[in-house]
Amino acid sequence: MSKLDPKERFSDRVADYVKYRPSYPASLLDILEEEVGSLEGRCVADLGSGTGIMARLLLDRGAHVFAVEPNDAMRRAAEQASSEHPRFQSIAASAERTTLEPDSVDVITAAQAFHWFEPTEAREECARILRPGGEVALIWNSRDETDAPFSLAYDAFLQRWASDGYRSASRKWDVEKDRFGGFFSDAPKEHTAQNIQKVDLPGLTGRLFSTSYMPKPESTEHPVYDAIRVLFDAFQKDGFVDILYTTRLYIGSVH
């Protein structure tokens, strides 16, 4: 999996991604609008838009959304959910070469996606398509890494069952800050919001297999499924466990 082209990395797990990936809290969209102004009637390019999780939230705020996604399977999932919306436009392109017109968008978002971009080329493209005064918002749901019991057990599970890519991903925040430190013209504004995903056993299983670093066995007889059940049973309450996230938002200029 680690050798796959990033643009194809999630092709075999789109169904799990659609069903089980967390959305973003409304408070985060409120903060975004406090920083860039109301999104009502504004043109937003959502780069690496995937299955359209952020695009749908932007549409709900009244934005005209260009959903830019190079992965065919993920883009089709977004189109299935939003293609009939009059303010949604799906674009088969990358963050580095969006095909959008110069000075054509007011705001750029990249949710759970920037770490797949080539930063220098993406910066140049963002500067090209943004109108004067436009800003870029980079967003991640970062799974809780405190000493909460479920968080510790979940991490131990991934250390046992995930690929080597998980160990790299677990250090991604230091890496990401280094990578996008030169992306913005000045130090970006940083905001955080709390996010909770309540899942049942199928939801926990699907959430695990929606990640690029969690190998998905061909058969449900594989022992990893028993391990997931043991993890869930140890922490479930009324048939659910809570996966805690800190949602991080970085906003800045690239001009």
Image: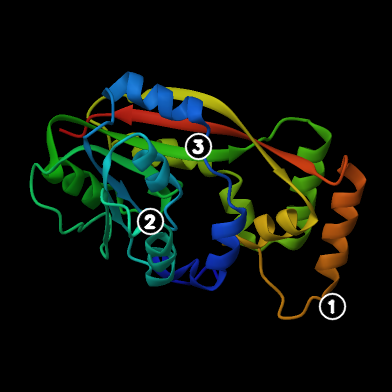
Place of residue 69 in the rendered image (x, y in percent of width and height, measured from the top left)? 33, 60
Q: Observer-nearest residue: 124 or 38?
A: 38
Place of residue 10 in the rendered image (x, y in percent of width and height, measured from the top left)? 50, 66
What residue is shown at x 46% (from left), y 49% (from top)?
A: 53
Place of residue 43 in the rendered image (x, y in percent of width and height, measured from the top left)? 21, 40
Badge 3, how many Cα within 10 Å: few under 14, some, many 20+?
few
Question: How are the colours assigned in the image?
Answer: rainbow
Q: Secondary structure at mark 2?
A: helix
The reply, left or right, for residue 188 in relation to residue 227 is left
- Res. 158 in view: yes
The mark nearer the N terminus, 1 or 2, is 2
Q: Observer-nearest residue: 59 or 71?
A: 59
**Contact flag, marks 1 and 2 (Cβ < 8 Å):** no
Residue named by callout 3: 174
Place of residue 62 in the rendered image (x, y in percent of width and height, measured from the top left)? 30, 36
Q: In whole angstroms, how far apart are the C-alphas of marks 2 and 3?
A: 35 Å
Q: In whole angstroms, how far apart are the C-alphas of marks 3 and 1?
A: 37 Å
Residue named by callout 1: 221
What residue is shown at x 25% (from left), y 49% (from top)?
A: 122
Give the vertical position of 230 relative to 31 (above or below): below
Q: Nearer the viewer, mark 3 or mark 1?
A: 1
Give the vertical position of 187 relative to 139 (above or below): above
Residue named by callout 2: 82
Q: Could you tell me the amino acid type at mark 3? A: Asp
Q: Secondary structure at mark 3?
A: helix
